[in-house]
Amino acid sequence: MSKNKWKLSRFYLIAVFIILYAPIFYLMVYSFNSGGTMHSFEGFTGEHYAEVFQDTRLLIIVLNTFVIALLSASVSTIIGVLGAIAIFYMRRYRPKQTLLTLNNVLIVSPDVIIGASFLILFTIVGIQLGFVSVLLSHIAFSVPIVVIMVLPKLEEMSPSLIDAARDLGAGTLQVLTKVVLPSISPGIFAGFFMALTYSMDDFAVTFFVTGNGFSTLSVEIYSRARQGVSLSINALSTLIFLFTILLVIGYYFINKRNNRLEGKGAGA
């Protein structure tokens, strides 16, 4: 009976992955189609990828997207790590739970509501829609993600490490930089990469706060898709998907390296 359950669960898992990845591979295959539609595959070609790299405006938008993603991920990681540490060391239960609840509300709130709220806020404050508005909004919705990633690592950290460091004469800054941050580094890297991917993939919030003359890849792809089927969109989406895979692989090896170093440290 257990063997049959194992086969059923494995079949279910395979079916889920097929449903999730089949449309992506369909899109990728037709990015090499020499025809102009996605109905019949006429032959392999790389002209659609050449169109992507020859489109100067699109390359500028790609650069904008990466700059926004890197800046927002870096700033939100710093704020999120400090926020997670502050929440973790709060002694009063009620304020601590209130902050955690407010943090989680931002994660589960619909992107449309968040985007509309930022649009109203920037309009009232007088911030012009464009690079700054997109950057601020991406930082805002990325900070809660970093906090969620870092808090479990803080809870796993042994309090004896901090006590030992203080007994040896370490100050608050030394404890933070030499003990706490190295101990929670896997959570920091996880938060950074999650914030990076969320920023690159976000559409709903960015759509509300972007202005004339500035755009990101998600908004640009949506705008081009509305104008009709273009296989250059397939090529662009394929490149983004492959880049995301590289990010995941990079995070995997960094996490594996950190775990190996932790194992050596524990063995010593």
Image (cartoon, rainbow, N blue to C red):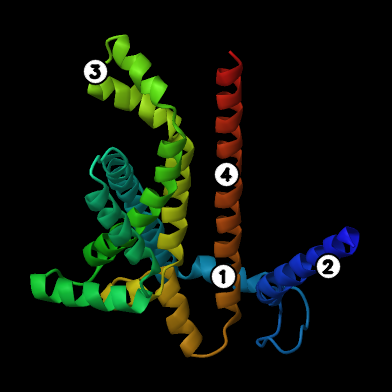
Left or right of 169 on screen, residue 191: right
* Mark 3–mark 1 distance (CA, rounded to whole Å): 49 Å
Identify the amino acid type marked 4: Gly
Give the quadrant of the N terminus.
bottom right
Identify the amino acid type marked 3: Gly
| Residue under the image location 29 percent in, 20 percent down | 174
Which residue does the numbered mark 3 point to in the structure image? Answer: 171
Contact, CB < 8 Å: mark 3 with mark 1?
no
Q: Earlier in the sequence, mark 3 or mark 1?
A: 3
- How far from the left and from the top, in percent, is residue 188? 42, 41
Q: Secondary structure at mark 2?
A: helix
Contact, CB < 8 Å: mark 4 with mark 2?
no
Q: Up-down: is 227 above or below 7?
A: below
Left or right of 244 on screen, residue 14: right
How packed is label 3: few (under 14 Cα within 10 Å), some, or many (20 or more)? few
Which residue does the numbered mark 2 point to in the structure image? Answer: 8
Q: Nearer the viewer, residue 172 or 141?
A: 172
Give the quadrant of the C terminus.
top right
